[in-house]
Each structure stands twice: as C-alpha cells, then as structure tokens.
Image (cartoon, grey):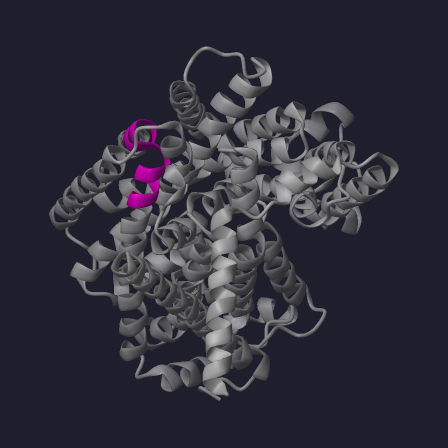
C-alpha cells in the first residue's frame, strides 16, 4: 500500500516544526563555549544515551543492514549483541568515565583536543582535526544523499530540492544551537525511531502469526534459498552459514568489522561522554542505550529476515526476488510499502528521516569543531586567534556542510557507497590505539601516540587507495598511477584496511612509547586525577555498600 | 527453540535480549543508588540546619 503524499507532507511539516521547537529549547540554555561545544557538561543520562544511539544508527543501519539480513539471515544478530555489549556497555562503563574525567582535567572541549592535550601535542590535535575535517565530509555526503533520495522517493519532490531542504534545516540548528540543540533534537528523533521500530516489530510478528510461528515459518523455508547462495554456504535464514564458506566469512567479517568500526574510536560518539556531569550518569545511560540499540538494529535484522516469510506468502517469492536486480537496499522499503498500513508507513518514514538527520547533525558538529577549533584556531593559529571559539566553530560547521553538499553532488555513487566504511576504518586505525593508550596505559608517550596516529592513518589510506579492491577500484588512483587496479592481487585485495592498519598503529604506539621517555609524574597525576565529585561519588558508594553489608548482617 | 533450529541463531537472539535487559538492570541499579545518595545528602543537610 503506497502512502498518500499529502499525509506525508503534513507529517513532515509537523515534524520539522517540532524539531525547531526542541532545538530552540537547547539554544536558549546555551550561551557559552562549553555549552556550544559540549552541551554544558551536565546533560541528562537518558538524553546522552539517546543522542549517542541516534548518532550511531543511521538510515543505512536500518534499511541497508535490514536488507542484508533478508539475504543472509538472522546470523547477523550476533552483530546486534556485539553492538550492545561493546558499543554501549564497554563504551559507557570502561571508556566513558576516563574520557569524561580526563577531558575535564585537561580542559578539552573536542575529541581531537582531548587526545592532543593528553599527549601535550598541538600536532596530534591539528592532525586529528584535519583527518576528521577531510574525511568525515565523505561519510556525511553519503548520509545526506541517502536522505535526499529518501525524501525524493517518499514525498515525490525534486532530489536537489530535498537535499537542500534537509541540509539547510540541520545546518540551521547545528550552527545556531551547538551541541545541546543537537542532542535535544537527537533525543526527540530517537524517541520517534523507538516508536517506529516498536510498531514495526509488533506488526510484523502479529501479521506472521506470532513470534515462534514466524520463526518456524522462516526455518521451514530453508529449501527456498537460491542455489547460487547455497553453493556459497547459505543454509537457511535461521541457520549460520556453513563454516568457512564464503558467506560465513562475509558474515563474520561484517560482524567483526561492525564491532571494530562501529563503536569505540569515532570522534562524534566519544565526544558525547564529555557531556555528562559524572561517572554515574554514564553508568545510568547504559539503561537507555542498550535497549535502544536492540530496538534499532535488532528489530531491523529480525524484520528483514522475516520479510521473506511475508513475501513468500503473498507473492510466492523470497525477498531477494521481489526487488529489482536483487538489490538488498530496496527490500525494507518494499516490505514497508506492501505490508504496513498507510498511517504507519508515514510514521516510519519520519523515523527513518530522524535516523538520517541525527547522524548528519552529529557529523556536522564534529567536522565543524574539528576544522574551526582544532585545526584552525588551535593548530594553525596556535591558540592565538582573536575570534571567539563559538564564532570560529560556527564558520567551521558552515564550511564543512558546504563541502559535504558539494561532494554529495560531485562524487560518483560507487565512491559514496564506500564512504562510511572508509571513514570508520580510518578512524579505527588512526584513533583507537592511541585512545586506548591515553586512557589505560600511562607509559604511552607523545612520540608513541604521534607515531601511532601517523602510521595508522597513512597505512590505512595507502591500503584503501592501492590494495583493497572495494575502494581502490572505484577511486581509480592506483589505475592512473600504476596502470593496474590494485598493487597486490588475490586474497590481499580482499583484506580490509582495518585488519592491516590497526595492528600497525598499535605496534607503533607500543614500540615508540617504550623507546621514548614517559610523561612527568606530575602531568600524569593531573591527567588521571579523580575530581571532587568523583571522590564524593566513591565515598557515597562505599557508604551505601557498608550500609547494605550491615543490613545483611 | 523459538522456532529456530540452529543453536547459534537462537543463542544470538537470546543474547541480544538478555544483554539489553542486563543494561537496563545495571543502569537502574546505578540510578537507585544515586537517588538514595541524594536522599541521604538532603537528609544530612536538613539535620545540619536543625542542629544549627
């Protein structure tokens, strides 16, 4: 059932009005640098968790991966588990507190500044800022193209116009309101996403006769898997692929990469740890973040896989056969339009628009602070610029939004499709080792961190451009210079850059750190210092433990 | 189990739900602890005021 355009347009107008209202709430509370850059460092745990989740989950995580689950089956649920465990629990409980406390001890207001000040290096700050500012626009371009296409297909308005509308609205509240507005709007959008996904889950299960019945029906369809997929190891949608088969490797590498790239080293996510007032807020936020990811990724994968049952019952075909050319990106939209009532389709479209907007807003803010504050004000001007931080950042955000839009118009689809993986791979190799070193290994030195950052980013970029076929072929740089698509052939051209560059980056961090003198004990003491409120928190914890113990006695 | 024959899949299905529930319980325990502390703090403050 197709949704009526007038209903959708009405929904979208109301939605944008709500967005402005909520953004204004954030803007009114927001007058100083800490407010603009870090949302005042007193954000409510639930808002932080929803904002983190909404920035994490983009439209492609729902539509793209839902489609992949329709093709490969429910084995992808391991990725959901890993995302909840690493992306929320480990991130919030292990990485979050150190990031927050150190950020405050060092007076850092962005992620590049956090690692720069931790290693007393303007170079690290400026280089990281530049890395984010140069490569994140690619990723942002892929998100805004997705949103533009989405508005075009659902509202029937011109693609260029929808891309422009989408960008201008986000630009307005990101530039004007800073991170607090972004996080407030994220929380509203995340709520909408939760409502949409909950209805989708309940509706799908009830339409297919219940939870167990729906799964059983899917299990019984194992004989319908196309022969081409069976040959590659597919054993049905409710079974893991055959061990060591090509599909098994695809699934395992997707899961490992998803965990590796999806979480710990992304600046736009890590910066959110610095927005809450204490460690306990981070632990509280786990209560919201975990279920949120389950309801986003978990529901998308289950519904994606179950779409096979629905299509088989209604059309006699599996999902891959329903969409043109077996394009998995079209499976979820096809399922929604066929199976769901009109009102729900309209609501769900808004959920998807929210997913795109919240991811794009987080990107714009992070890119803007990276180029305006970290690269220009702190790096190029060495902190001597007379302009205020907020003003410089606003220019930075406006500039990177413009670059992202230009890229969205200029770059070929084949490159844009790889942009997300490219950016995340680069982040992991460049930032993860020194981020771990910054938080957990006091022996890490300035030279070690610099070596890791440079080795990770250069080896990752080299592998992307010259070896890994998925990027090297569409980029065409290797072809232009050396006359062949990739420098190494065979299995090497299939190995993801993360698997090569991240170990190299870790190695550089450890070896160079061990060879160079470590930071002074005074500096380390200041950096790792627990603050008054932490001590108060610990004291109250131990007091409450004592109270519990004595109550037990 | 749950209409799914392969243990590798139903385990994943359950692991997702249990990990999300675990997150809720962990967060809720920290939430309550904080409120108790607040209550203790405000109680102490009141006591101090009364003593004065």
x and y percent of residue A92 in the render? 51, 56
Which segment is the magenta one? A172-185
Left/right placement of residue A260 relative to residue A388 reads right
Left/right placement of residue A455 relative to residue B11 reads right
- The quarter holding residue A16 reads top left
Of residues A343 and A263, the one drawn nearer to the viewer in this rendering: A263
| Residue farthest toward the right in the current orientation of the protein | A515
Left/right placement of residue A239 relative to residue A304 reads right
| Residue farthest toward the front in the current orientation of the protein | B52
| Number of marks in the rendered image | 0
Q: Is residue B11 above or below residue A67?
A: below
Residue A457 painted magenta: no
Of residues A38 and A137, the one drawn nearer to the viewer in this rendering: A38
Residue A182 painted magenta: yes
x and y percent of residue A375 in the render? 55, 22
x and y percent of residue A215 in the render? 42, 81
x and y percent of residue A153 in the render? 28, 44
Residue pictured at 78% horizontal, 27% vertical: A482
Residue pictured at 35% horizontal, 71% vertical: A311
Of residues A55 and A553, the one drawn nearer to the viewer in this rendering: A553
Q: Is residue A378 visible?
A: yes
Q: Is residue A326 visible?
A: no
Q: Which quadrant: the N terminus of chain A?
A: bottom left
Q: Is residue A479 above or below residue A530?
A: above
Of residues A296 and A48, the one drawn nearer to the viewer in this rendering: A48
């Amino acid at each position: 059932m197709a949704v009526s355009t007038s209903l959708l347009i009405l929904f979208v107008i109301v939605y944008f009005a709500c967005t402005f209202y909520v953004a204004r709430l954030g803007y009114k509370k927001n007058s100083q640098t800490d407010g603009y850059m870090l949302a005042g460092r007193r954000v409510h745990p639930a808002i932080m968790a929803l904002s983190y989740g909404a920035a994490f989950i983009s439209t492609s995580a729902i539509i793209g991966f839902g489609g992949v689950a329709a093709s490969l089956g429910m084995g992808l649920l391991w990725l959901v588990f890993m995302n909840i465990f690493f992306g929320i629990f480990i991130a919030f409980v292990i990485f979050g507190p150190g990031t927050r406390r150190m950020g405050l001890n060092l007076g850092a207001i962005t992620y590049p500044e956090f690692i720069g000040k931790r290693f007393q290096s303007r170079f690290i700050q400026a280089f990281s800022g530049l890395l984010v500012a140069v490569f994140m626009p690619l990723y942002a371009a892929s998100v805004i193209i997705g949103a533009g296409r989405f508005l075009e297909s659902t509202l029937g308005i011109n693609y260029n116009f929808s891309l422009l509308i989408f960008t201008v609205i986000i630009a307005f509240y990101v530039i004007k309101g800073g991170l607090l507005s972004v996080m407030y709007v994220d929380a509203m959008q995340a709520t909408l996403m939760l409502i949409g996904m909950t209805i989708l889950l309940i509706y799908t299960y009830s339409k297919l006769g219940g939870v167990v019945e729906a799964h059983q029906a899917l299990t019984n369809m194992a004989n319908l898997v196309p022969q081409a997929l069976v040959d590659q190891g597919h054993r049905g949608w409710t079974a893991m692929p055959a061990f060591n088969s090509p599909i098994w490797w695809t699934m395992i590498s997707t899961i490992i990469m998803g965990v590796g790239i999806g979480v710990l080293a992304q600046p736009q996510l890590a910066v959110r740890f610095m927005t809450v007032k204490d460690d306990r807020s981070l632990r509280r936020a786990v209560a919201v973040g975990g279920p949120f990811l389950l309801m986003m990724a978990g529901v998308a994968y289950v519904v994606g896989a179950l779409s096979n049952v629905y299509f088989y019952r209604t059309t006699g075909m599996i999902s891959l056969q329903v969409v043109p050319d077996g394009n998995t990106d079209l499976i979820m939209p096809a399922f929604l339009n066929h199976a769901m009532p009109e009102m729900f389709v309209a609501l769900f479209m808004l959920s998807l628009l929210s997913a795109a907007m919240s991811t794009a807003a987080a990107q714009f803010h992070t890119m803007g602070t990276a180029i305006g504050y970290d690269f220009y004000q702190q790096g190029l001007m060495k902190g001597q610029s007379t302009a205020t931080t907020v003003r410089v950042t606003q220019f930075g955000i406006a500039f990177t939004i413009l670059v992202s839009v230009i890229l969205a118009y200029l770059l070929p689809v084949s490159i844009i499709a790889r942009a997300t993986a490219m950016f995340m791979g680069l982040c992991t190799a460049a930032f993860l080792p020194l981020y771990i070193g910054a938080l957990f290994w006091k022996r890490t030195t300035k030279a070690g961190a610099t070596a890791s950052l440079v080795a990770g980013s250069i080896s990752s970029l080299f592998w992307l451009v010259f070896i890994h076929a998925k990027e090297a072929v569409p980029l065409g740089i290797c072809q232009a210079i050396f006359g062949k698509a990739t420098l190494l052939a065979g299995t090497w051209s299939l190995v993801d850059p993360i698997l090569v560059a991240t170990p190299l980056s870790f190695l550089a961090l450890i070896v160079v750190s061990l060879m160079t003198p470590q930071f002074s004990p005074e500096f380390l003491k200041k950096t790792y210092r627990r603050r008054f409120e932490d001590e108060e928190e610990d004291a109250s914890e131990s007091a409450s433990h004592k109270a519990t113990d004595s109550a037990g006695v | 189990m749950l209409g799914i024959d392969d243990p590798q899949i139903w385990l994943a299905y359950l692991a997702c739900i249990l990990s999300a529930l675990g997150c809720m319980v962990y967060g809720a325990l920290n939430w309550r602890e904080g409120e108790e502390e607040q209550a203790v703090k405000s109680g102490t403050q009141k006591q101090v005021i009364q003593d004065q």
